[in-house]
Image (cartoon, grey):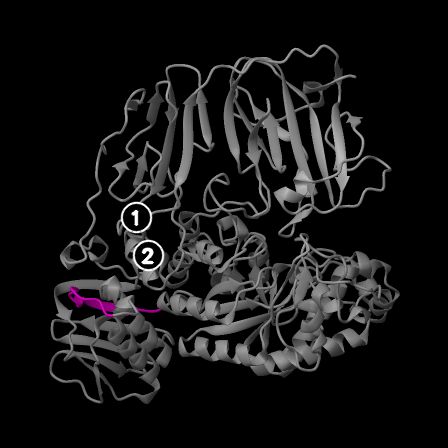
Amino acid sequence: MKREIRLSGIASLACAAALVLASCSAPEKRSWNEGINVIPVPAEMTRNEGAFTLNGNTAIACSVPEFAPATAYLAAKVKGSTGYDLTLVQAAPTDNYIYFVQDTAISAPEGYTLISTPKGVTVTAATPAGAFYGMQTLLQLLPAEIESPAKIKGVEWTVPAVTIKDQPRFKYRGVHFDPARHFAGVDFIKKQLDVLAMFKINKFHWHLTDDQLWTIEIKKYPELTEKGAVRTEGDGSKYGGFYTQEQIREVVAYAQERFIDVIPEIEMPGHALAALVSHPELSCTGGPFAQPRIIWGVEPDVFCPGKEATFAFLEDVLTEVFALFPSEYIHVGGDECPKVRWKECPDCQKRIKAEGLDVKALKPGKDGKRHSPEELLQSYTITRMEKFANAHGKKIIGWDEILEGGLAPSATVMSWRGEAGGIAAAKQQHDVIMTPNSAGFYIDFLQGAAEVEPASIGGYSTVGKVYAYNPVPDTMPAEIGKYIIGVQTNLWSEYILSDEHREYMYYPRVLALAEVDWSPNSRKDWDDFQRRLTNAQVRLDYHNINYHIPMPEGTLVDLVAFTGDSAAVPFANTRDLPMVYTLDGSVPTPESAVYTDTLMIGGDKPVTIRIATLLPQGKMSRVRTIRVEKQTLKPATEVAGADSGIVMRVAPGLYVTDEQMAGAEFGQDTVVRYFMRGRVPDSGVSPNSLAVYEGFVELPEDGVYGFTTDMDELWIDGELLVKNGQECASRFQRHKTTRAMAAGKHPFKMVFNNMIKHGWPNDWNEITFYVKAPSSDEYVKVTPSQLTHEAK
């Protein structure tokens, strides 16, 4: 059933339905606290009769000094939200207690049991880590308001009576953090560590170096951060940041208190430009290199393994890194290393011959494949650095490219290009961390339609896709599965321009990861996870986490034009959550009309729909605004002297603001067959330039057309239809609109600002615009045969 709404002459509409929300003064109505809401779901759990009630007289009992981190953490958390200053005692009283007990018979190092009765709660573990995770489960058995940093009244602090026996499925449960494209400070990291600990994540992979920034202080080489931790962006602004060694120690200590192992990554031999800026002698060409890379992608200049100085430098760097990070692991990257410089480098070719890699390349390796001498040189580099790490008591992790040329003897492989690399490594009896981008574990991917989500690298990764992953399915042979030690999500920050955006990409997908990593696959239940996720998001609210809420999709244009009696305007979202809307342009509230079916908008008066997704606690997504209006067909233009091609004019230089663009001084008009990269052939125009294209576009039929472009502006019939501003990279035709057009020629103007927007060169886009015909469902780029200009 579709809802018909005709607004001609109607001043306002009553809400069709209202969402009943919980009252803060009635805790029993807080729907998100109903049931048991632990994430990740415990391995074994039985619900029993009754509940334990926490109050100001509850005692925390523990006689195990090593469990002090768990008991102190619990006491501080309880005091913040309840105001109760709980007593810490050695022995448990007969009732009203939370008792921590050590039992070395529990074989899983991070395992625990938790038994709650009306008299009290007992957490038993063999290790401090197990006690800490049992404590986190106890906190999740309490109402979500326990996470409040300030005292909350009107909450009954009850723990359902349960028997839990729990341990993680995998020992490695990781989250990746990339400050080398866009930086984030220590306070942000600590905030995330608090949340990761809540959901039993135990590895924090810190990607400290890349082509774009070097973000770790190295005392022996201060120039690494002096020159490699700052860059001049495409708009002329300065950008950068780095961590002092004191800040790193602070983060590591903070993480250790939460049983999180911080794993540093120092990229080698590729992704090295930020280091080569200050040490060009470590490259194959000798440089010079003006600054770190200011665009995304992979730099061809890498460390030169033909030079002994390169290894001396890397060993010096790692020596300082090892002293800062007590982790057993060091991540050495090893990914996306172009070999073009090595092929041309006399030093590298000399090394290849000296090590016999040219001869070795003639025969298949352990994986049964033949590898080029340069691939074998990469293997030589990683293996040599592994020996150095092993000598310092460290194990190396590398991206799955370290398979190429042969694995270092004891390396752990992080499989990102699907699962194939991980399976190949496991067959060679190497530990594997699965992080396949194809399964959604690259969480810089879109969480919904590109038209409603922030700019991103593309891809598609919803919380449901992450949750569905099983790294060791039943079909995987046991001799392979035993080498898979865990799963990790990776958040690369090319398109992450703020701390809030970074959180928006992390959560709630990291919570899905937590359950993939910790819980037995047989215990996973998507519907129940979604129910528990509601409670978890309330907890995240108390940590001021800007998590993703699915946006209303379905209608993906900013203006819906129609020519008949009405227009159908459907909406949906990726998790089938309720949506609320208004039709008078006002901002929706939780009490606004609830969307139930396709809106049918009719009448002569334009209507502004504003719609948002609603969570049970009353929190809403960002609001979408869609204008719906009845239009008459815009008439085509009669062009007396139409000729093939379009007119292009170019203004050299950098234009960052609208004011600068308006004041641009253009050269003479040039007729071109099709859109070009913003420069007149052989004109010597600088790479930064502003190009304007004008002419006529032929539309084949009467009706409502869709228009979009990745260029800066698109005008049709003198009206600005699409504008992509400077706030983010312009990709994936994120802004779309519709207009009613008659068949024939219509004047257009397209503006192309050839500059780098937040690391994305605008000319990496296809320089064109796209049209969706009335009889089609697809946006298709205009062709040269559709484009003409008026000959003078």
Which amino acid type is shown beneath numbered disc 1? Leu
Please tell me in which quadrant of the rendered image residue 689 appears: top right
Tell me, yes or no, if residue 529 can be seen here.
yes
Which amino acid type is shown beneath numbered disc 2? Gln
Give the magenta-colored segment's residue range.
151-167
Label 1 neighbourhood size at 10 Å, few (<14), some (14-19), many (20+)?
some
Residue 12 part of the magenta-drawn span: no
- Residue 645, x across and y down, in percent: 75, 22
766 or 370: nearer the viewer: 766
Residue that badge 1 annotates: 615
Mark 2 near mark 1, Cβ–Cβ under 8 Å?
yes
- Residue 398, x across and y down, in percent: 61, 65
Please tell me in which quadrant of the rendered image residue 141 appears: bottom left
The CA distance from mark 2 to mark 1 is 9 Å
Residue 162 part of the magenta-drawn span: yes
Residue that badge 2 annotates: 537
In-image side of 681 versus 705 (left or right): right
Name which residue lies at 85% across and 64% down. Answer: 349
403 or 500: nearer the viewer: 500
SS for callout 2: helix
Please tell me in which quadrant of the rendered image residue 459 appears: top right
In-image side of 128 versus 725 (left or right): left
* Number of numbered discs on residues: 2
- Residue 535, x across and y down, in percent: 28, 57
Label 2 neighbourhood size at 10 Å, few (<14), some (14-19), many (20+)?
many
Q: Is residue 245 above or below residue 29?
A: below
